[in-house]
Amino acid sequence: MAETRYTKDHEYIRIEGDTGTVGISDYAQGQLGDVVFVELPEIGKALSKGGEAAVVESVKAASEVYAPVSGEVTAVNAELESAPGTVNEDPAGKGWFLKIKIADAAELDGLMNEAEYQNYVKTL
Amino acid sequence: MAAEAQEATTDNAGAAAPLKTPLHARHVALGARMVPFAGYDMPVQYPTGILTEHNWTREKAGLFDVSHMGQAFLVGPDHETTAKALEALIPADIVNLAPGKQRYSQLLNEEGGILDDLMVTRSSDPDEDGALYLVVNAACKDADYAHIEARLPANVKLIRAEHRGLIALQGPGAEAALAAIGPDAAEMGFMTSRTMKVAGIKANVSRSGYTGEDGYEISAAATKIGEIWDTLLLDANVKPIGLGARDSLRLEAGLCLYGHDIDTTTSPIEAGLIWSIQKRRREEGGFPGAARIQRELAEGASRVRVGLLPEGRAPAREGTEIATPEGEVVGTVTSGGFGPTLNGPCAMGYVATAHSAAGTKLNLIVRGKPLPAVVAPMPFVPNGYKR
């Protein structure tokens, strides 16, 4: 069973073995509004925890998506280029951004689990 | 995730508790997301979101609360006296403005820079001869009023219409929706104004707007504007639209947003607003900054506002550098985003005149990378004005 962890900046990482699938939370897509463009990294790019991983743009503004943990990009969701609205429709599923090979599993410890994240969102 | 660009629609002019328009409670009840804008708490979008609101306005009729804008009357003994007082501050021909007609113009500083842009309307009512109705930008209104009052002759007064609300009904369905509750609306031409009953309430209605579509702006007492708003929303073709879609609609229409596309450093000639300076004023001058504007009319401006269409789907936002294919920086984007009707990105900005011809290939430097774009005529989406 895959486990999902969250950052305070509203990225999620769904962990399956040493691979993580990264996207933005349902709360984040709601705050952004209609997503019209997603810029994804090159496959093979080394990301560092907290560094820029992708860019998501709504009608109004551009926002950076940060890497929840360090690691190498192993896949990107190219479907988002032609259908960026998928991020709004299914952020936790078909609206994923990229997959990352987790370099240091210990970095996951600092992230929130599902219950902690839902409580965090209630405080915003 | 973090916002990189300031939200295009958010201007935090007032740090104090935000003001509320007469329709504020209605926006909250409709589930709008409220944001501070020019000192007011305003709806940026309703639950359906900006894309849906934008498309609805292009296809049906969108209803906007623009009560935050400044409404005022300039009142003198007769039309010529009032018009001449205003002509000393703006480059439009107001003396020859016919009763019931409206004009777009700009308040200019002594250097020919734009202090604000505004709409000027001459009343159609002979009893109101000598009165001009002004609508100015919310963020500028206090400064505008002070500027105007300091320069008026003793027999012309500025009267702030603070107890009025203002709503805009925009889109191809606007005429049918308004004519159903104010039959006179159907007979009006573009950029005309008249006083009429709307849903039984006395209102000043003009056929104009800020979306590129046919439509109206409706001014009425603050205590009554809500009744007109509610009555219009009973029409299945009318939905409320927030400031987010107002911005994407005006961008596609190639219309300037004050503080972004025009400001105290830009002249009306640089901004491509020559059409708003009538022939008599171009020749005679007699407005602030006339020397610069007449020189730019004769010799051309060194930079001009152009439309830009980026290749691909990445939007180029305000502040993006504009460069030649060789890498020389020749300008800056002043408004940019995603055009829902265009189904792609669009932008406007100032470039050195040598690079301003339609079809010129330029690069927009987005996140450090050159994004190819082409200079394109505006509006990006054909307008639907009722001529």
Image: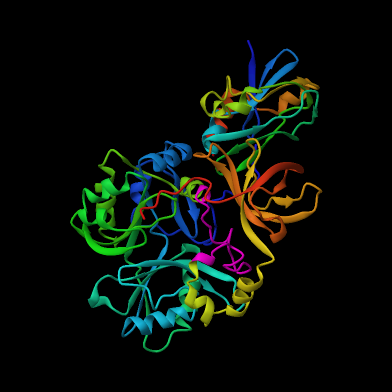
Q: Residue B96: which quarter of the image?
A: bottom left
Per the picture, the main secondary structure of the magenta-coloured stretch is loop
Residue at screen point 28% across, 38% down: B236
* Residue B365 seen by the camera: yes
Q: Position of residue A103 (x, y in %)?
A: 81, 22
Judging from the image, the colouring scheme is: rainbow
Magenta residues, start to end? B251-275
In which quadrant will I find the C terminus of chain B?
Answer: bottom left
**Residue positioned most to the left:** B200
Q: Residue A110: which quarter of the image?
A: top right
Residue at screen point 32% across, 44% down: B173
* Residue B266, magenta (yes or no): yes
* Residue B287 seen by the camera: no
Relative side of A39 to B17, left or right: right
Relative side of B379 to B153, left or right: right
Q: Is residue B126 above or below residue B46?
A: below
* Residue B319, magenta (yes or no): no
Residue at screen point 72% across, 24% down: A108
Q: Position of residue A4 (x, y in %)?
A: 63, 20
Residue at screen point 24% across, 72% down: B125
**Residue positioned most to the top:** A1
Numbered marks: total:
0
Q: Position of residue B178 (x, y in %)?
A: 26, 50
